[in-house]
Amino acid sequence: MQRAAIGTIIPNPKNPRIIKDDKFKKLVKSIQEFPQMLELRPIVVDSNMVVLGGNMRLKACIAAGLKEVPIIVADQLTDAQKDEFIIKDNVGFGEWDWDLLANEWEVKDLFNWGVDIPSAYFDDDKEPEFDKDMLDEALDGYINSKVKQITLYFDNQQYEYVLNKLEQIAKEEGVESNTEVIISLLEKYES
């Protein structure tokens, strides 16, 4: 591992994942509050200083005002291996053990560290207030159910359009989550 000036590192235009809005702010904050984590998980670059792993961390480091960051230079990879690394570095494997999370960590810390606590339990306009009973009930719901995920891919323009439409439909239907919006749309389609 070595250190490099932030200006010498090139963000990868092929980076398939982004972090936006509040999650990005939390990443910047976590880097500011716990910079040692960068030493443990440096940014991976190729021999041309193009990021293979850590694009969002690099962006957050820039936003945090860092001048240099730890890097690992992966100069032995073929182009095909670089492409494979970029994807595999961004794939989210595994699932949260909600029971362990509920019993071993403070929910407020989990939220602040970027764990997706069910948004239906928070007021979107302000920092969430943590009612322990409500959050325990929410986590129990996750623990005792089989949660499945569907991932849809959109280009930037489609993403913004879909997100805006989901928000619009949620307001019209009086529902709080995208899951409820989609279920409502499917039920209307059936009739």
Image: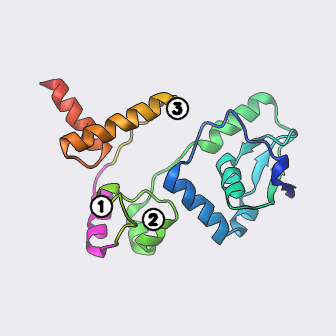
Q: Quadrant of the C terminus?
A: top left
For residue 111, which numbered disc appears in the image?
Answer: 2
Residue toward you, 5 or 53: 5
Real-space Cα separation, disc 3 to disc 2, in angstroms: 26 Å
Mark 2: which secondary structure?
A: helix
Q: Amino acid at mark 1?
A: Tyr
Residue plotted at (22% across, 46% down): 175
Quarter assignment of residue 179:
top left
Residue 66 seen from this side? yes
Specify few, some or many for label 1: CA neighbours under 10 Å numbering under 14, 14-19, or 20 or more: some
Counting from the top left corner in percent of width and height, residue 152 is at 44, 32
Counting from the top left corner in percent of width and height, residue 114 is at 50, 60
Sequence-first disc among 3 and 2: 2
| Residue highlighted by disc 1 | 121
Residue toward you, 114 or 97: 114
Residue plotted at (43% across, 74% down): 106
| Residue highlighted by disc 3 | 156
Real-space Cα separation, disc 1 to disc 3, in angstroms: 28 Å
Counting from the top left corner in percent of width and height, residue 51 is at 75, 43
